[in-house]
Image: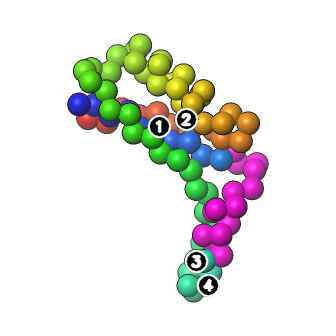
Amino acid sequence: MPTIVVEVMPKAELLDPQGKAVVGALSRLGKTAYTSVRIGKRFEVTVDGPVDDAILADVRELAADMFSNSVIEDVVSIEVTE
């Protein structure tokens, strides 16, 4: 069964407190080469049957309306995997 992977990230202009915390932890571990981390969300939607244009349009709508908060997040990719 095909899976549609949707990735959502915080908008670039907004502070990512989780990412900032990870950078701080990396620094404390001596990993000083890393200056920024952004933490997002990944959704995997399994489809019963082939993925056609209608299914992709439906997932794009879900991504915009349900999986992400358009005020603070961007849908950065929607990809079909087999």
Labelled pair 3, 1 in contact (Cβ < 8 Å): no
Labelled pair 3, 4 in contact (Cβ < 8 Å): yes
Residue at label 3?
26
Q: Nearer the viewer, mark 1 or mark 2?
A: 2
Q: CA distance from mark 1 to mark 4?
A: 32 Å
Query: Horizontal and vertical percent for residue 52?
Result: 35, 16
The residue type indicated by label 1 comes to Val
Give whichever of discs 3 and 1 has the lower sequence position: 1
Residue at label 1?
6
74 in magenta = no
Labelled pair 1, 2 in contact (Cβ < 8 Å): yes
Category of crowding for the residue at label 2, using alpha-carbon neighbours closer than 10 angstroms: few (below 14), some (14–19), many (at least 20): many
Q: Is residue 48 above or below residue 46?
A: above
Q: How is the image coloured?
A: rainbow
Q: Is residue 59 visible?
A: yes
Give whichever of discs 1 and 4 has the lower sequence position: 1
Magenta stretch?
Answer: 11-24
The quadrant the C terminus occupies is top left
Give whichever of discs 1 and 2 has the lower sequence position: 1
Category of crowding for the residue at label 3, using alpha-carbon neighbours closer than 10 angstroms: few (below 14), some (14–19), many (at least 20): some
Left or right, 34 with reference to 52: right
Q: Is residue 11 above or below residue 55?
A: below
Q: Is residue 82 above or below residue 18?
A: above
Residue at label 4?
28
The residue type indicated by label 2 comes to Phe
The residue type indicated by label 3 comes to Leu
Instruction: Assign a secondary structure to mark 3.
Output: helix
Give whichever of discs 2 and 3 has the lower sequence position: 3
Give whichever of discs 4 and 2 has the lower sequence position: 4
